[in-house]
Amino acid sequence: MANTLQRTHIQIIFVVLFSCFFYNFLSSFVSSSSIAAFNLTLPHEHPYPEHIVQELHRRVNVSLSRRKTLETAQVKDQFSCVTGNPIDDCWKCDPNWPANRQHLADCAIGFGYKALGGKGGPIYVVTDPSDPDPHQPKPGTLRDAVSQPGPVWIIFAHDMIIKLKTSLVVSSFKTIDGRGVHVQVTGGGCISIEHVTNVIIHNINIHDCYPSSSDGDGLHIFSSSNVWVDHCTMSNCADGLIDCTVGSTAITISNNYFSHHDKVMLLGHSDDYSADRGMQVTVAFNRFGEKLNQRMPRCRFGYFHVVNNDYTSWVEYAVGGSSKPTINSQGNRYIAPTNPNAKEVTRRLDAKGEEWESWNWRTEGDLMVNGAFFVPSGDGVNPQYSLASSMDPKPAAYIDQLTLNAGILVPNPGGITNPGSRGSGISSGGGLTPGGGNGGAPGGVYGAGGTYNPPGDGGDYGGGGDGGYFFSNAPPSPSYQTSIILSTILIILTLYYFVTNSYFHL
């Protein structure tokens, strides 16, 4: 009887010790949070060790797969960020773009591809959204930044609304870079680029501009060259959203979102200003959104490449002009309004049929939707189209992907994303008022320390430290290693006790 009891005691003790050892051994490979996440517990009654072991092995294999994904997250992120949009693919695929902001200047396309902005100059951080005295700019303000001599790369310390008292006159070799924050420019005159060269305006929300020493344009480019306007959201200004006049040239207007406006874009000063004959402007990857009337763009004299834009709304017309401009429309999507009298994309202004029939306007690879139609004119293979060609068009079938991120890119935990330019809400997904769609996905899904979560916080898949639902990047913590050592010592001491007390000599 005593021997039987001793055997029973030995079996019970060995089961307990083995369970403790096995549990601690697994804990060194699987974090406690993973067990909690799957609600996996060891049953107190009627345990099934083989079943549990199989389930744990399955979970471990899943975790190893996740870890492999995590280790290659940067490479996968680079592949997943590729949209076919050459501008965005140039800089957004770099997870360290905030440390290399000036690389953006290498990403321009179209006629404005040579725009250097403030490349090579110092970084100026705008900390003050006020505009107290336009004649004596206050240090730390945007007005002070754009008035600095030489190349300057301007960024912003935080979200801000800048209410201008009068036009913000930008000097040569400046970049206004709003990436990483939400910067709004509004008020008197808004932004004026006059008699200068090499200016980049990027990621700024420009709206509700009114006349003040200006016509109230959102952005007026006057007798200037090598200008690039990219990823801006523009709406509801007193005159045009963008006007390029008086001999301006070498301009690219790309990745912008336009909405809620009458006369969107004027390219060319007037019908009698022949100096605009040399104007070259690229309009690419923009989304022309809701409640727009006309001028997308309205062109005069020069050479205009309208390529891979998405036209989702107009009232009168989309693309128009006068004074014999050359318009090369390629790879756009034109979605006509429901009005049966407004299906035509094009409009010739101030000219009779016998006059405009010789103008070189062509449509090539454009996608016409809802009854839209483009009226071409002139010779479709005229050599002059080479002067209105600035980049290779992408197929219009990819227009959703190409213009997905049009407009400002708002801050996100893992980087920046577009708020959803099809909708109408800065705060909840696109446009200007709540209720939009097509919101961008948060960055850093895998929580790889420093993207979605800071180092050490882990993330959904434990990318930065001891956290995460699966594996951590960090090695097993000292507590796990200690538990294994203590368990091993305990087993050895227990076995020694049994042997020395003759428990095994039954």
Image (cartoon, rainbow, N blue to C red):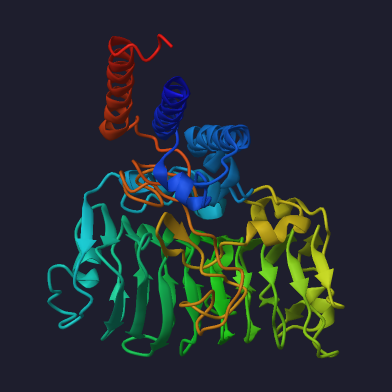
Looking at the image, which residue is at 50% across and 54% down?
112
Looking at the image, which residue is at 65% across and 57% down?
402
Relative height, residue 506 to residue 220 (above, below):
above
- Residue 185: x, y in percent? 35, 77
Relative height, residue 336 to residue 14 (above, below):
below
- Residue 75: x, y in percent? 52, 35
- Residue 428: x, y in percent? 50, 77
Question: Which quadrant would the C terminus be assigned to in this image?
Answer: top left
Q: Mark yes or no: residue 473 visible.
A: yes
Which quadrant would residue 20 be assigned to in this image? top left
Looking at the image, which residue is at 56% across and 40% down?
47
Relative height, residue 387 to residue 217 (above, below):
above
Which quadrant would residue 499 be assigned to in this image? top left
Q: How many marks?
A: 0
Q: Outermost residue toward the front?
A: 1
Return the residue nearer the eye: 346 or 268: 346
Relative height, residue 330 to residue 120 (above, below):
below
Return the residue nearer the eye: 76 or 402: 76
- Residue 404: x, y in percent? 61, 62
In the displayed structure, does residue 276 sit left or right of residue 135? right
Q: Mark yes or no: residue 216 visible.
A: no
In the displayed structure, does residue 496 sit left or right of residue 60? left
Return the residue nearer the eye: 352 or 367: 367
